[in-house]
Image: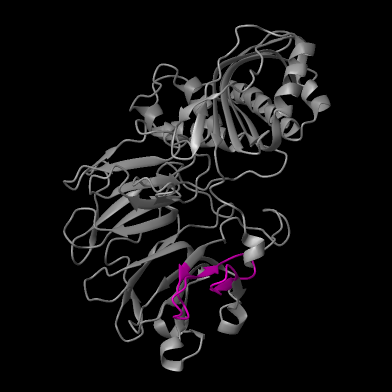
């Protein structure tokens, strides 16, 4: 049974069910859809590589398919730098030889191809002598056109396929929607190697890179030269990049005394002693760490490990850390979101887990030391926390906490002055999705801070839920709650009165894959904050149909 099937069936067992569900049938159907999805992933790789011989193996001799039309002229600007092309769909259908020629011509119109995705969004199966599939698929192709402009091709299609000899053969493919966007200029260039910040790492899961979570970054002017520097964590070694003001960085972690921190996951710069230079806190899957920046008293770049004497040397599965003045004494405090050792310990629930390791709240004592007070303040959350964000969510000038939990509902802790109270449900911000990141911004320019939460988006999960609850799609009932486990990111709009509205389904696409973090930023300088959502989980040749 796949991870997604197991998770959703476990979720079903946690809910009161009046209808009978045959897990074996669900597993059978999902096995077929997973096999189809993984084979379409093979097709994606073949298209990316322009391997026409490999592409041909996926199509049945009796194929009937609508052609890829040629690119039409531009009809105007969709945004400041991106044009949307008018691409009418053909009503004709091609046989297999003509369709393969059509594919060849289509691929030739692109000077390069960077990424290709064929994703199964829904599928139905007939159990005949040879199983037959009818599926809705989404197609995405990213590359450059013949003018070397970056081009995005997005399409929807109805697919029919028959399974024989453990292979799916596509015998019908009808394009139902097509959008092509072209960037007039390149907005970004990849310069990490030239800038001196490139670090090669083995693929996740191989020796030298056992964990995908031990990677974070923080920026600050650590040497008081007016330029932002960067600190990154990684498996086995960390890096401190000092800005040289010429487009390059110098790696100085060993010189500065912050090189050897093998368990660090997320860095956080803060001036905990209020001496004017940024100190470095490291969340860790082990003992938490604090390095005092000695620039002000000593005049040189040196970090001193004061983890033990400062009192932050506490054990946790720390995945991230944030800082704010919690108790209003003018000193920055630290909150650590703590997870657990997934695989060694499994969540005791897929949607209401409580067996993660407790989060930590370090209160700054003003004498170079901290006291851990998470339990006393009511924020020792143990719902497998990934990330947190401080903010004044109710307008009382106190710093509150929004907490993204992976296997439990997210929390909104309002600061009461001497402790926190979880009011996520009352404020319309209860998000039962697999929370992995949170960021704040004003997306609609109404002067109020909105909240973006990154979650898992699983096409396999959505297909399973549709089969489990065919009459409840999109409802707020059982399927609606479970559906959040696979629905993707959330956006909460502030109503300006301390309450929030979930606008995830109405403002635009929120299904961003396995999204880990992100942030608000005005990329195109049009006065409106955009959302960046880094995501990814699967690498290599096997899709595993997430």
Residue numbers of the magenta segment = 219-248
Where does residue 154 sit, x and y in percent of width and height?
Answer: 56, 28
Residue 90, visible in the rendered structure: yes
Residue plotted at (19% across, 53% down): 394
Decide if residue 286 is on the left or right side of residue 37: left
- Figure quadrant of the C terminus: top right
Q: Position of residue 171 (x, y in %)?
A: 71, 11
Q: Residue furthest right?
A: 53
* Quarter of the N terminus within the rendering: top right
Q: Is residue 57 shown to the viewer in this render? A: no
Residue 460: name its quadrant: top right
Residue closer to the observer: 317 or 55: 55
Relative to 37, is 339 on the left or the right? left
The image quarter containing residue 51 is top right
Q: Main secondary structure of the magenta part?
A: loop
The one nearer the camera, 101 or 173, is 101
Is residue 397 toward the left or the right of residue 299 in the image? left
Q: Position of residue 311 (x, y in %)?
A: 40, 80
Seen in the picture, residue 249 relative to 519 is either above or below; the reply is: below
Identified at 71% across, 43% down, the residue is 540
Magenta stretch containing residue 96, yes or no? Answer: no
Relative height, residue 441 to residue 474 (above, below)? below
């Amino acid at each position: 049974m796949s991870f997604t099937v197991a998770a959703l069936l476990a979720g079903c067992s946690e809910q009161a069910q009046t209808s009978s569900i045959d897990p074996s049938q669900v597993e059978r159907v999902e096995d077929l859809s997973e096999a189809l999805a993984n084979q379409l992933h093979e097709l994606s790789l073949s298209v990316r590589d322009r391997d026409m011989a490999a592409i041909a193996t996926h199509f049945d001799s009796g194929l009937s398919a609508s052609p890829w039309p040629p690119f039409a002229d531009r009809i105007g600007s969709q945004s400041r730098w991106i044009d949307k092309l008018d691409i009418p769909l053909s009503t004709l259908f091609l046989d297999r030889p003509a369709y393969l020629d059509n594919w060849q011509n289509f691929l030739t119109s692109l000077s390069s191809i960077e990424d290709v995705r064929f994703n199964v969004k829904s599928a139905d199966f007939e159990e005949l002598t040879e199983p037959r599939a009818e599926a809705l698929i989404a197609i995405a192709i990213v590359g450059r056109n013949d003018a070397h402009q970056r081009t995005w091709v997005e399409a929807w299609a109805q697919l029919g396929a028959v399974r024989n000899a453990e292979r799916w053969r596509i015998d019908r493919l009808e394009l139902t929607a097509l959008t092509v966007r072209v960037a007039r200029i390149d907005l970004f260039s990849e310069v990490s190697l030239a800038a001196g910040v490139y670090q090669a790492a083995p693929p996740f899961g191989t020796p030298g890179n056992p964990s995908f979570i031990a990677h974070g970054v923080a920026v600050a002017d650590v040497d008081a030269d007016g330029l932002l520097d960067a600190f990154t964590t990684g498996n086995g070694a960390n890096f401190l990049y000092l800005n040289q003001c010429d487009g390059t960085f110098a790696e100085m972690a060993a010189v500065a005394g912050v090189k050897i921190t093998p368990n660090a996951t997320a860095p956080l710069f803060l001036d905990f002693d209020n001496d004017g230079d940024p100190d470095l806190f490291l969340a860790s899957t082990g003992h938490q760490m604090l390095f005092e920046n000695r620039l002000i008293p000593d005049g040189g770049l040196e970090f001193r490990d004061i983890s033990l004497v400062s009192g932050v040397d506490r054990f946790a599965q720390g995945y991230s850390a944030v800082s704010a003045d919690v108790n209003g004494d003018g000193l920055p405090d630290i909150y650590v979101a703590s997870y657990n050792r997934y695989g060694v310990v499994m969540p005791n629930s897929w949607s209401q887990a409580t067996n993660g390791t407790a989060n930590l709240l370090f209160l700054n004592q003003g004498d170079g030391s901290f006291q851990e007070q998470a339990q006393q303040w009511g924020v020792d959350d143990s719902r497998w926390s990934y990330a947190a964000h401080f903010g004044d969510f109710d307008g009382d000038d106190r710093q509150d906490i929004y907490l993204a939990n992976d296997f439990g509902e997210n929390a909104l802790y309002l600061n009461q002055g001497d402790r926190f109270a979880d009011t996520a449900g009352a404020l319309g911000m209860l998000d039962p999705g697999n929370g992995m990141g949170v960021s704040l911004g004003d997306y609609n320019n109404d002067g109020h801070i909105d909240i973006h939460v990154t979650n898992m988006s699983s096409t396999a999960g959505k297909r399973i839920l549709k089969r489990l609850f065919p009459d409840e799609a999109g409802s707020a009932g059982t399927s609606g709650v479970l559906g959040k486990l696979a629905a993707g990111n959330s956006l909460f709009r502030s109503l300006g009165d301390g309450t929030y509205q979930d606008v995830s389904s109405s403002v635009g696409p929120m299904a961003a894959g396995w999204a880990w973090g992100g942030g608000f930023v005005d990329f195109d300088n049009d006065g409106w904050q955009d959302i960046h959502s880094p995501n990814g989980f699967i690498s290599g040749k096997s899709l595993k149909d997430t």
